Amino acid sequence: MDTLRTPTSSPIALTATRFACDALRAWFRPKTGVMIVLMGISATALCATHPASPLFGGILHARGPHGVYTEIRFEPHRLIARVHEPHMCVLHAHLVHGDPHTSRYAIEPPQGGRFCDELVDGEILIHPHTPNDVIAEFRSVRMDWSGRFRRQTQAH
């Protein structure tokens, strides 16, 4: 009857194995901590909510079917409206009154562009419909334009 022999290890083999394990342990130990920290930061970055874009875009219309594409950028206590072709001008306005239903902005003197010049001493009324959708009215003595504006995605 053969008995299974237990392998006997030589002291040299045990020392070599122990040295290799100690070396691997020493190599992985500092890197493990760094990996845990990096994985935590990555998970936090992926789960974090991105701030909503302050930029809204839409078509301003008068009474007719034709309109002009306009972007509205909301900033603290002010907005900037960039009117695109064919009118090409920029309006700056500061907040006069704001509540959950309507915000009223006074248009500051425009810096050129006939369309924007027609809005001198005018106002922009913002009516939030949803967090991503607002109705804007551009009003003055000489003109009255309005449109629906949707939040634009922010380029990163």
Image: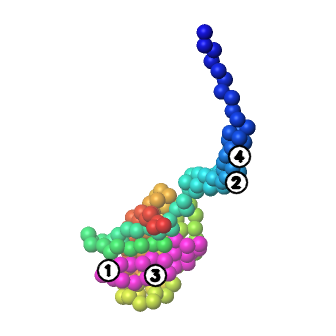
Q: Is 15 one of the magenta-colored residues? A: no
- Tell me which residue sits at (55%, 78%) in the image: 94
C-alpha distance separating marks 2 and 3: 56 Å
Of callouts 2 and 4, the N-terminal one: 4
26 vs 134, nearest the viewer: 26
Query: Of the residues tagged 2 and 4, which is closer to the observer?
Result: 4
Mark 2 surroundings: few (<14), some (14-19) or many (≥20) residues within 10 A: few
Name the spot of residue 138 as percent of width and height, x first.
42, 75
Quadrant in the picture for the N terminus? top right
Q: Which residue in the protein does label 1 denote?
A: 85
Query: Of the residues tagged 4 and 1, which is closer to the observer?
Result: 4
Q: Is 76 one of the magenta-colored residues? A: yes
Of callouts 1 and 3, the N-terminal one: 1
Q: Which residue in the protein does label 3 denote?
A: 91
- Tell me which residue sits at (27%, 72%) in the image: 66
Label 4: element kind: helix
C-alpha distance separating marks 4 and 1: 74 Å
Q: Which residue in the protein does label 2 denote?
A: 30
What amino acid type is highlighted by mark number 3? Leu
